[in-house]
Amino acid sequence: MVQLIGAALLGGLSGTLTIAGIPLTAAVGGLTFAGSALDLAGSLLLSSAVGALSAPSASQAAQRWMLSDPSSLPTKRFVYGETRAVGTRILRCTEGTNINHMYLCYLLNSRPSEGEFELLLDKRRVALSGDPYDFTGEGGKATNLPFSPNGGISSYIQVWFGRGDQTAPPDEIVNDMKVGASNPVLSTDAARGQTVVWIKLHAGPPGTRQKRWKAIPPYVEVEGKWSKIYDPREVAHAADDPDTWEFSDNHALCVLDALRTNPQRPYRLRNLLMDQWESAADVSDITRDLKSGGSERQFRIAGTLAFDGSEVEDVIVPMMLAGAADFVRSAGRLGIRPAAWVAPTYTLTDTLERTTYQTMQPGENLPTQVKVKYTSAAREYEEAELEPWDIPGAQAEDGGEASVIEYNLKWAASPQQAMQARKVLGLRARRQKVLGGIAPPDVVQLEAGDRFTLTLPSPGSARNGIYELRSTRPALDVFGESGMAMRAQISGVQDSADIYDWDESADEEDISDPVYDATDDDLDPPGSVTVASGDGVDLDTGGAIVSRFKFAFAPSPSDAVLRYEWEWRLDGEPWQSGGTIDADVDDGSGDVFTYLLCASVIEPHDFRVRAVSRLDISDWISLTGAIYDMDIGTVTATAGLGHASFTGTAPANDIFKGFRVYRNTVDDFDSATMVEGLNAIDPGAAFTVHAGDETTVNLLADGDLDDPSAWTIGSEWTMTGGIAEKAVANSGAGYTAREVSQVVPVTAGALHRYSITTASRVSSGVVVYIDGDTRKRGDTFGGVGTDFGTFNAPDDTTGADVGFLGWTGHVGEVDSVAIFEQTADHLAQGEAYFWVVPVTTTGAEGQPNGPHQLTII
């Protein structure tokens, strides 16, 4: 009997049957029998947050290494949004017309892409000239070091990007491989419909290959705009014609594309609630203001979807999580509810049977803090983490220890998007008031995810409010045993517009992302090398002493360093390998070190070292001229008038002869100039070595201003305790009131150097001068500290006044002044670096001591 009634009802649902004014054919998608009632297909909201927490999710770094592995068939992948994709090598050949070339092809996206693209090899950006999209020409050529030695005039790399519309490999590669290749590249090796990059590598000079090619073949990444997708809102787009699609990183559209085009279980349009997907696409395009200024679309997608055998839902759910969106199943079709507030349009005023209320979980299990990881474009697309977000008021309400929930939002296209999703997910996770019951038939107009207002009379009024509909299950009472032909079992969770509000000034946190420097991605080298030899370093074998050096250096600051590679040579000879040093070797002071047996106790040894990681090597750091037992030890350097002095103790080695002094304006001994020739010193003796004219004296008596009687002091100045002070801006008197001077013999017209040091300054400035037939002076100094310069003396300096002058408005203190005639023997004026270099009896120079940074007056 039930079957007959059911069959009759089924036959009657041809588009005309309505209950409580609701057309059933519009509200439900099918009928099933369940005892004496006929169940109608309802709707269910599926929480993506719960699914993402339970689904396996590899980190971005792990996924990149998996995709870059060429050991098996390339994993099919879809790259969405504007992001960085890793390449899987699908071709490698070193044969052909030139064995110094390598030909490579990498799969980037298993479908066409938008572009434009930028190439990175082993984490180093490659700048290109030419047209890398023209497969009939030379492609793009590298223009930056180390891939081009001369700014692109010649290049070690040629690149061709195939965006999916290519019909053959690059002509140049096909032609190169026609001669001498046992397995040539054919014109049919096009990878049609897929995004690839073809690369032609030239090995280049042997001496620089290891620096240029850190890995063979290289680790390839490409940045740009990727998949073109279907947008149902666009009239020009045809769902079954990818040629009409366009690039978009819209969150809802990218998820829709993954559902429709995945190779495992694609959805057809008839299986999807397309009106919901279109509405969600509109929500994704809503603009979010940024606290730093500007704006961005609020929900976007950026990342690679790899089809590695996992369930489709497992790989797509994390995409949903990036927009804090949920799936909806209704009448067998799949829809989406975006993270957006839509006010309720339905009010539930009564229930047909007893309504149940409960909390979803105990309060102590509710989260009070949310931790979120995301992919940071500013950090080279590595995983980053937002600051832990304390859900407002949650800890105070729950008490006890903080309860933390974590989400991986690796698909979020910006940290601000991750912050907004974090807020929605965190506040949703705090919802715990749910209701369940049987609602009147007109509730079938709602689908899961819709919101409704509950206004029950007392005693149910305590639970009144706004609820999100989690599920509906409409049913027909075949026999009318419950007094109404149709009813709907529903469940809902209390909801609030506050969950979805966003105020960038209050909700957005500051991000400390480093600025990407595209000029150099190299491994950091170790620190400067130091050398020791002699007692305490020599190897005591128990019968003989073996002479050796100890070379030490600060470790590289790069975390990726695995070891250090070092080489040595006698001065001017070829480099020899010394071996490697483990990265964790420590001499007790934090330095890495190694020993080298002396090849000669009288000849200079050179040493160099570089850091090595799995994919990279650093620049060499060198030390030259290490002679056994030729350490100088501590040297004290002082600057004088046109000269520099160095004191210390000479090496006790019998082959030591003396010192030379070198100078440079930069900290680079290799380009330094000798400014003092050999000063002979006895081995082991205390020494003082001068560079420049150490006999130079200040023309002014009492340049330290300790003796006022040595000066003619103007009325605006006072002098005491080594300080000359001008305490008033102007007393109204003439120049002499503002001067402090002496009568000094001066060479007429000669170039003179000067210096003046001020202890304090309130206003205006001071100047050093020489008065003769005219007044000559240096530049006005309006600061605190030491100023120096040069000027020519007057042509007639008979009885010349020499000193310093405070201008009319000057208030301040001077504590020293000097002036002297410049000669050819004086060192250049200004700041410079100096090195003291030991010299042996054979004339060989040992390890420089320095740099000593001095300012020469």
Image: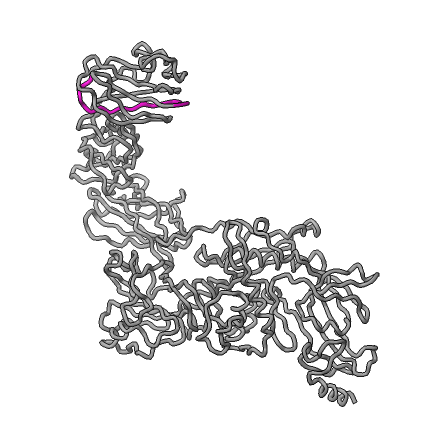
Q: Nearer the viewer, residue 423 or 453?
A: 453
Horizontal side of residue 724 vs 828, given as left or right: right
Residue range of the region highlighted in magenta in the rendering: 746-763
Question: Looking at the picture, how far across and down is residue 53, in whole percent?
Answer: 59, 64
Q: 113 or 411: which is nearer to us? A: 113
* Most distant residue in the top direction: 709
Depth check: 639 or 176 in front? 176
Assess whether residue 751 is covered by the magenta stretch.
yes
Instruction: Point out the residue furthest to the front here.
Output: 235
Place of residue 89 in the rendered image (x, y in percent of width and height, measured from the top left): 37, 70
Point 31% across, 9% down: residue: 709
Location of residue 286 (image quadrant) = bottom right
Residue 516 sits above or below residue 544 on the image: below
Q: Quadrant of the C terminus?
A: top left
Q: Is residue 70 visible?
A: no
Residue 549 screen position, x and y as percent: 28, 44
- Tell me which secondary structure the magenta stretch mostly adopts: strand
